[in-house]
Amino acid sequence: MWELFLPVLVFLNEKESNKILAVEAKEACVRRLGLAWALALFVGATSASAILNGDFTSALIHWKTAWHVTSAGGEAVLADTQDVHAFVFQADEVGAGQFTIEFDFRSALSVEVPDGAFNDSFYASVYYVDTLSDFITENDKFDASQGLFDCDANGNFNINGTIGDSPKGAGWSHFSGTFNNSHTYVIVIFELYDLNFVAGDSAVRVDNVAVTAGGTP
Ligand SMILES: [Ca+2]
Ligand SMILES: [Ca+2]
């Protein structure tokens, strides 16, 4: 499908093109996943933090992944070695209300942008659904979504919250934000897109993912 729209995109602003490409890739990927997601989706239970194994102490238990996502040192590691799109997510039945989401991340995204390609990019998002079977059998069908932030080698963009220093130390950042959920399920998802089409030159680590009731990060 890339060949169909790449010629058009070269005439657009690079950043806009990057985003359009990523959205197109995401939509195509979501459709392609279909049954795979249906089989893979895990529904966590509500607790102090709705996210289970948010610190990845138990590797990727309670998380579902596609393509190159591994755990190392109690962290989730997304890389771009296997597909244009790698992701890790967890769905939780939190109910309606205001919530705080926090996590640490460490970006190691490539600065390389070959002619005709774009920056490798990372996206953190929340999806909201009332009926999980709708989402997992027809993945572009969700009730609402909210981007948390995007990033590439040039920095963080579209930040819907606050990004600051992380207690994990050098190279790590801490995201904190709030969201209002009026649906039954919240799906927290982290995605890495290989948009420079150079395999294996980007990775992002994620740790300490927490979703708690209340609106003060
Ligand atoms: Ca950890
Ligand atoms: Ca790449």
Image (cartoon, rainbow, N blue to C red):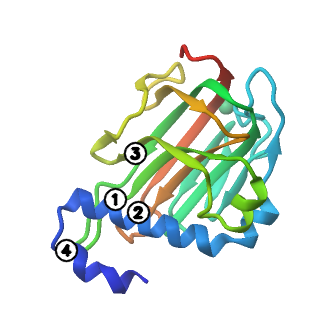
Residue 122 vertical position relative to residue 47 in the rendered view, above or below: below
Residue 101 vertical position relative to residue 206 in the rendered view, above or below: above
SS for dot 4: loop
Kindly check if marks 1 and 3 are in contact, taking CB atoms under 8 A apart as contact. yes
Q: Earlier in the sequence, mark 1 or mark 3?
A: 1
Residue 19: horizontal and vertical position, in percent? 34, 59
Q: Residues within 10 Å of mark 3 (few under 14, many from 20)?
A: many
Q: Amino acid type of disc 2?
A: Ala
The residue that appears at 72% across and 37% down in the rendered structure is 56
Q: Earlier in the sequence, mark 3 or mark 4?
A: 4
SS for dot 1: helix
Separation of residues labelled 1 and 3 (CA atoms): 10 Å
Mark 1 vs ligand 2: CB under 8 Å? no
As drawn, the label of residue 150 is 3
Residue topped by disc 2: 22
SS for dot 3: strand
Quarter where residue 212 is shown: top right
Q: Amino acid type of disc 3?
A: Asp
As drawn, the label of residue 19 is 1
Residue 77 vertical position relative to residue 172 in the rendered view, above or below: below
Observer-nearest of 51 and 166: 51
Regarding residue 83, the answer to whether it shows in the image is no
SS for dot 2: helix
Q: Amino acid type of disc 4?
A: Val
Separation of residues labelled 2 and 3 (CA atoms): 11 Å
Observer-nearest of 200 and 144: 144
Q: Residues within 10 Å of mark 2 (few under 14, many from 20)?
A: many
Residue topped by disc 4: 10
Kindly check if marks 4 and 1 are in contact, taking CB atoms under 8 A apart as contact. no
Q: Is residue 35 left or right of residue 12?
A: right
The residue that appears at 39% across and 70% down in the rendered structure is 198
Residue 69: horizontal and vertical position, in percent? 63, 55
